[in-house]
Amino acid sequence: MILAVVVCVLAFSKAAVALDNGLMRTPPMGWLAWERFRCDIDCDNDPKNCISENLFRDMADRLAEDGWKELGYVYVNIDDCWSSMDRDNNGRLQPDPKRFPGGIANLARYLHDRGLKLGIYGDLGTHTCGGYPGTTLDKIQTDAQTFADWGVDMLKLDGCYSNASYQEQGYPLMTKALNATGRPIGYSCSWPAYQGGLPPKVNYTLLGEICNLWRNYGDIQDSWDSVLNIIDWFFDNQDVLQPAAGPGRWNDPDMLIIGDFGLSLDQSRTQMALWAVMAAPLFMSNDLRTLDSSARAILQNRGAIAINQDPMGIQGRRLLKEKNGIEVFWRPLSGSASALVFFSRRDDMPFRYQTSLKQLNYTTGVYEIYDVFIEKPMPTLKDTTEFVVSVNPSGVVMWYVKEAESAHFSEKLQGPLLHRYNDRSGSRILL
Amino acid sequence: MILAVVVCVLAFSKAAVALDNGLMRTPPMGWLAWERFRCDIDCDNDPKNCISENLFRDMADRLAEDGWKELGYVYVNIDDCWSSMDRDNNGRLQPDPKRFPGGIANLARYLHDRGLKLGIYGDLGTHTCGGYPGTTLDKIQTDAQTFADWGVDMLKLDGCYSNASYQEQGYPLMTKALNATGRPIGYSCSWPAYQGGLPPKVNYTLLGEICNLWRNYGDIQDSWDSVLNIIDWFFDNQDVLQPAAGPGRWNDPDMLIIGDFGLSLDQSRTQMALWAVMAAPLFMSNDLRTLDSSARAILQNRGAIAINQDPMGIQGRRLLKEKNGIEVFWRPLSGSASALVFFSRRDDMPFRYQTSLKQLNYTTGVYEIYDVFIEKPMPTLKDTTEFVVSVNPSGVVMWYVKEAESAHFSEKLQGPLLHRYNDRSGSRILL
């Protein structure tokens, strides 16, 4: 009998519950509270950093006023610990009254007035990971409607305090419930992360139908070890993960921690480059009020963002893992272009890596190269030309590569990648 | 018979071969090539970074012109891979003729003319770690005299390609040979690092008599993992190591990698703070030509340098290792002062650590506090006053602490710590 119910739910979810919000044709971008601000609810002693409407308004002000919004960073996302410990008399979630005295609807208006969007957090289970009220199966419809009524634009549905079969029922039910509200609400599912992230436990075809994005793996922490661990997991499993992504459905390796405390500048560029290659959602979790200029420059790098937001939405892959510690990543982009990332796992000194585009599977031809972090074009390369890139320890060199015959690079390349295009000094290519 | 020789050598070395150069009454400071430039001898393809006289002149220029020398950073130290593969006809070491066409004596003059000192590298054994000619027992006197003739001011004697008994003979013999030259040459011994760094294999009393500094542990690499591993080893073994240090004899946890590729700003402050607490030699291994301003500010921090260079020369200790990931370090300083470092091993968000000076073993009294990296005084603290410091993930808060009764702080505190003393804003103490 129980089995019959599960089978029935499964069949139902696959056939009838495709997410129909039309959102996130490119990876969503914005800001998410968790990694940087966690469950800090101590507004008495830590008023600037506690989870409160003031924090989200502060971040919204920064996104709107400091050039983020124009680049695509429009989501301001609440994570755990926002709610009251009790539902209201009608069984609805309600925000903590002391920390969100204006309520969530007010906060959503504040964001919408500034051209931003509001994300909120729920948990499919008895409690959220932080111990706040969870969304049990019987509450899915109520909570979806509450979020819609508030004007919420995105939901991250975590999976603490539930189990595999509960999740198998609940995540598709939330899809249906969100559809039913009529409000387009982006849907981030933590489901696969709770099931190990890999088939057969995880069905990426189904996820692509019911969620806009999904957390495949564990939470990021503020350390290079954590970033490296995530990079390795995603690319070690690229044969499974890469085909799952596309417009409207994205693998989510978790937040950008650039601008926090644990990454060097080179490591920050590496996270930005590889999240762009992975077509990953770009949710910063940092303090936008105190971000320094070098972190800002990386997060606002127009080339990296353009690569991340490529309209084809094809996730990239690791091409090579060399014994010398160099790894090469590649992502196909629209307009016969591609992104190449040379990454060094070394911890000694900049490594001079020699190769050619032909060795990286490029077809016969001449290619124009733009260095994303130097923000300058490099000399043109024939596919057979041997070149050397100098890659810093734990750092990257990131290139935007475009065939030169089909279109003259400096005339046809459009938009952000043309930024500072006309300066040919500072080449990192050495023949 | 062999045993008899060893015993004889040991007795001789302990009794008669105390180093008599009078140098390094405070930990030596300067620059050392290894971590950043390794054994890069490819001057054809990498002319700016290869081990050559040009590299050392470049660094000397920077030390002399960019404010380093005045702060105490005076040594410019060559590491491995400087020499020719063959000794000269008289059995003397000679530099690679292509990379050091002017010779070492010329390079020493170039440095001396700028108020700097030259360090060189040798290896007690058949070969250096990089495969260049080593200093075998029969060559110790020759090499010491060659270095003295060239005007060298410091020798790092590595220990590749030898063994325990060879080292037991060789390191004291080099002490004797350096003494015999009549030139004061600072002597850095890698001996203990090759013997595990701990008694009974390592005799720190003997080392304190024959070497000015010694590498206790493995080489540092350009990563936070490496720095953390070194910090842990030195403080886990502080009962053995701390008493070994003093004026003229220092434990050496290896180079500062601040300004390279692997450390965040917070991690860079942590290395600077804990190297200061350890009374460690401050040899930067970075590219002073391209150092950014934030790394420079940390390396040139006057408070941290003053603490490192405290004339009492007492190495500091770890006081506490809290379950919450906070560790507290302490170093006694001259003038009834001390240094306190609060370090966070966490990887989430700034941690608000509450304590009092009394809980950190301070005696009854009122204390003036100067925050070394904020470069500002904090409010005065009674020993019993509970305070909260906010410590960043992988970062530190470093205080210079001085009794307030014995001398009015702002009048009597002399020298670099008075720098920017009169601004009381920006307090990190919250009651």
Image (cartoon, coloured by chain):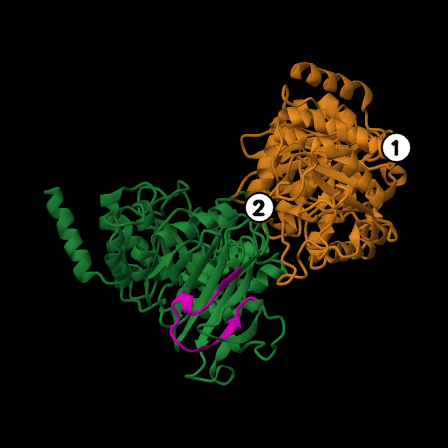
Chain colours: A green, B orange
Residue A48: % across, % down = 59, 50
Q: Which residues are magenta?
A: A353-373
Three-letter amino acid code of the residue under disc 1: Ala
The answer to whether A109 is drawn above or below residue A405 in the figure is above
Q: Chain of mark 2?
A: B
Three-letter amino acid code of the residue under disc 2: Ser
Residue at position x 60%, y 76% in the image = A424
Mark 2 = which residue? B223
The answer to whether A154 is drawn above or below residue A418 in the figure is above
Camera-side residue: A198 or B146? B146
Q: Which mark is residue B407?
A: 1
State yes or no: residue A372 in magenta. yes
Can residue A333 be seen here? The reply is yes
The answer to whether B275 is drawn above or below residue B49 in the figure is above
Residue at position x 36%, y 47% in the image = A88
Answer whether labels 2 and 1 touch (C-beta < 8 Å).
no
In-image side of A20 versus B33 (left or right): left
**CA gap, disc 2 and disc 1:** 42 Å
Which secondary structure, mark 2? loop
Quarter of the image holding residue B129? Answer: top right
